[in-house]
Image (cartoon, helix red, strand yellow):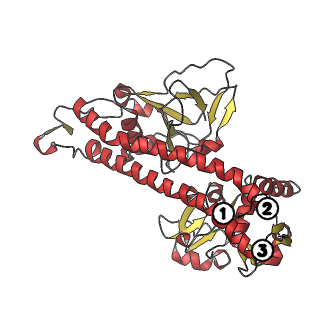
Amino acid sequence: MSWSVCKIGDIAHVVTKGTTPTKDQGFSESGVNFIKAEALNGDTSLDTKGIYSISEDVHQKLKRSILQEDDVLLTIAGAQIGKSGIVDISHLPANTNQAVGIMRFDRSKVEPRFIYYWFKQKRSFAYIQGLSAQAAQPNINLSMLKNITVALPGLQEQRAIAKNLSSYDELIENNRRRIQLLEQSAQLLFEEWFVHFRFPGHEHIQLADGVPEGWEDTFLPDLIKINPKTSVEKGKEIRYVPMSSLSKIGMTADISAFESRVNHTSVKFRKNDVLLARITPCLENGKTGLAYFLSDEEVACGSTEFIVMRGVLVSHAFTYCLARSYPLRENAIKSMVGSSGRQRVQVSCFDEYNVPLPPKHLLEMFDEIVSDNFDQIRTLMAQNDKLVQVRALLLPRLMNGEVSV
């Protein structure tokens, strides 16, 4: 079957770009989704770490950027030009900003998800990056976007290809939702037992100076090493973990963003060490990770803006949940110093941060309960890594007609 070559502008009803709220309008704690360009960096349609909120009133005022289901989005300004996403019904109502191009297609001619996957190809990304290199500042205008040519099979084949690739995305997204629920369960148990002191048998335990009887009144460094010294052979190739790979909402990391380096940073860590962002706004946004992705004897290095936490008298699960807890994060945020936009946590803020040490039997009970959650998360992440790899191999072959559907 022959494929026809079409320009984006000939097969789309709308080719436009978003708008950004003014300073007076601003963002809000909740409300209508506002999709920034960073949301287009994920493996599946949109990454929640790039989705913010605006009020309903601001949403209506930003008329040009109001999105519809199956709109295909493309980053058209900034370093990540060429990253794509597609709007699902679950994202709506929503708007996007001026760094994002919006393409709304005539469904009688084209399957929007086919176009989305066309943009997801490495060669498409490289092509669009090349277009942006022609400008003084990284960007492509709407005329350039309209003139991008795409090879299209028949509509039914477009739909079949999109359905095939979507099946991988759905599995990946389902696993991510399961990971999020597993982590939330562990975090809630930690807070119930060790923050609110509603642990099994708490009804029969008295508090003395705010600490349950039988618990030791300790400081964080008594239980957890902060930035422990970790050695690795000089010049050895090891993995480098950038800040961008950490999630705002969970322990998982985007391993596709990792690099291999022989020139190591000063921040080194081992399996199950906790990585806590120390710079604004990464800490406030929740960036915290667990080095679950390393093998038993492996050492990696990472961003110099990481604080490494290694449990000594407590497990990595306890350490991670503590790092995610509101009181610890508030303590760290209050210690920040530096110029606006580049403030950093002072590691000394942990020196006298009080962490009551529970009895050994309670720590063991907690670890026994949540260890299954952490094991399941590791398994699900390994599954997702494989799914991403298979999809990456299949995508270009489907898009050039090498594999039929």
Image position, residue 400 (x, y; %): 80, 60
For label 1, the SS is strand
On the question of residue 99 being in view, the answer is no
Among the two numbered marks 3 and 1 on one chain, the one whose residue lies closer to the N terminus: 1
Mark 1 and mark 2 residues within 8 Å of each other at the beta carbon = no
Mark 2 and mark 3 residues within 8 Å of each other at the beta carbon = no
Residue drawn at x 27%, y 48% is: 192
For the residue carrying disc 2, how many other residues have a C-alpha within 10 Å: few (<14), some (14-19), or many (20+)?
Answer: some
For label 3, the SS is loop
Between the residue at mark 3 and the residue at mark 1, the CA separation in whole angstroms equals 23 Å
Quadrant of the image for the C terminus?
A: bottom right
Image position, residue 219 (x, y; %): 33, 30
Name the residue that disc number 3 marks.
154
Q: Quadrant of the rendered structure where residue 223 is?
A: top left
Q: Quadrant of the rendered structure where residue 86 is?
A: bottom right
Q: How many marks?
A: 3
For the residue carrying disc 1, how many other residues have a C-alpha within 10 Å: few (<14), some (14-19), or many (20+)?
Answer: many
For the residue carrying disc 3, how many other residues have a C-alpha within 10 Å: few (<14), some (14-19), or many (20+)?
Answer: some
Among the two numbered marks 1 and 2 on one chain, the one whose residue lies closer to the N terminus: 1
Res 401 label: 2
For label 2, the SS is loop
293 to 380, vertically: above or below: above
7 to 180, vertically: above or below: below
Name the residue that disc number 1 marks.
85
Among the two numbered marks 2 and 3 on one chain, the one whose residue lies closer to the N terminus: 3
Residue drawn at x 70%, y 79% is: 107
Between the residue at mark 2 and the residue at mark 3, the CA separation in whole angstroms equals 11 Å
Between the residue at mark 1 and the residue at mark 2, the CA separation in whole angstroms equals 22 Å
Quadrant of the image for the N terminus?
A: bottom right
For badge 3, the amino acid type reads Gly
Residue drawn at x 62%, y 59% is: 39
